Image (cartoon, helix red, strand yellow):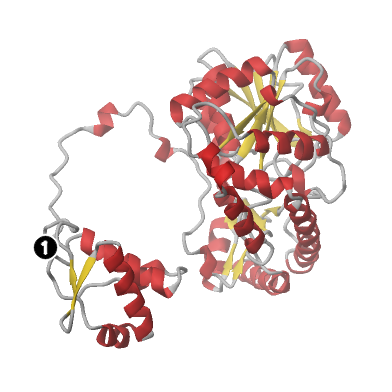
Amino acid sequence: MLIDFHKHRGDTIQSRLRRSVIEAIHSGQMTEGQRMLPSRQLAEQLGIARNTVTAVYEELVARGYLYSVPRRGHFIARGIGSGASEAPVSPRPNVDWDTLLHQRPSTLRHIHKPSNWQDFPFPFVYGQVDPQLFPLNTWRACSRDALGRSAIDWWTADRAVEDDPLLIEQIRTQILPQRGIYARDEEILITLGSQEGFFLLARLLARETTRVGVEQPGYPDSRNIFAAEGATMVDLPIDTEGAVMHGAGPLDIAILTPAHHCPTMISMTHARRAAIMAQAERDGTILIEDDYEGETSYSGDQSTLKSLDRSGRVAYLGTLSKVLAPGVRLGFMVADAPLIEEARWLRRMIHRSAPLNNQRTAAIFLAEGHYLALLKQLRHALSERFEKVVEGCERYLPDFPRATNSGGSSVWLECPPGINAHQLLAAAAKRGVLAEDGDPFVPEDQAGRFLRLGISYIEERKVDQGLKILGETANALI
């Protein structure tokens, strides 16, 4: 009997066995009428308890995958599997996709991390949630509340373009005021993270004649999304005060990360923000503010470009995923009502709305005060890890220039002359240290010069040793 029991690592033993049997049935590896191994024999084969196997068999009988014959055992039910003993051979493709595809997103520069990043002893990866910080039991309780009768009656219906009014209310009253933003319900749209916000705005605002200012270095996906609409990309350099717009010429759109620049984490100064707002007013530029890591500032400065907006030319993108978890995939856009209305109907053409059950769970999480409590805990933890990383960089990587930042969950380093980031990262990975390549954020002529250290996942007690290994690896390359 072919069961790939080890495929679903991370699930409970019962869940792994159940899913493995179901997949074997649907793939045709196990056929109708086939007798299952006796529970004792399968338990010994897999090294698990017999009661676990028995429980899985009984559940699969209840689901209709197996049937039981007294004193004979369990058998695969009829009409469940593929009916084939071997996987069908796929026909050879005869479509020339190379000539038909007008865009090749796979060829663009993207941020990559190995799928086994959790296996590294020292994972300096960005954007991953620390399981020790995430309030799992609280989230489960909110999820159960979202399954209550009154809530389930609302979110199981087809709401077309509607978002959860409770989530809109919580964002409007809890999150936005902390960022100096006061909006009406009709000025807020729920997205599947900030990235969808970029996509909606690009489709609505950009065309071939559009000049879009993008930070350099900067977030590759926002550049890729607007470039896909045919817009002209205009690089905006970064200095110690943030993005520089004054030398870019007239821009139709500018995409900015003033809270913490991606990827350096430099915070834009108040003077630079005021200058950019004045230039945008003068030139008629629409500003797209990606509030990148805005919620993880250690300095207490919570100002945004949107809070300075008096003419409605700032479209603000925020996310819940940085505080909750990346897999939650919930964000929001705040902009003038006419723009939000069109974005809402464009979103409908893609997927109508973000899953309403997830919206309600998040809304309850916010409404009961758990989000702000988690945010406070997260800021404290990141602040302590950040100090550890800074100390470690000064001790073990003194020749690596570091961008100055007062918040965020990563540190941006430049390699000194004679050290290639690709070689350093590859050698460090062999010793259990995983850091991120800076290439996706910079022009091709700067490849191999930068790396990023994420601090949101690695345990604080491992930071010093991980940076020591990285420093030793760097010294060995000189």
Q: Residue at x 74, y 60 (%)?
A: 399
Quarter occupied by residue 52: bottom left
Q: Residue at x 66, y 71 (%)?
A: 466
Is 92 or 392 nearer to us in this picture?
92
**Is residue 409 something that shows in the picture?**
yes
Q: Position of residue 330 (x, y in %)?
A: 59, 42
Helix, strand, or loop for circle 1?
A: loop
* Residue 297 position (above or below residue 133): above
Q: Is residue 231 left or right of residue 247?
A: left
Q: Residue at x 64, y 54 (%)?
A: 452
Quarter occupied by residue 251: top right
Q: Position of residue 27 (x, y in %)?
A: 21, 59
**Is residue 134 something that shows in the picture?**
no
Q: Is residue 246 left or right of residue 146?
A: right
Q: Position of residue 37 (x, y in %)?
A: 21, 80
Reading the image, the residue beneath label 1 is: 85
* Residue 186 position (above or below residue 478): above
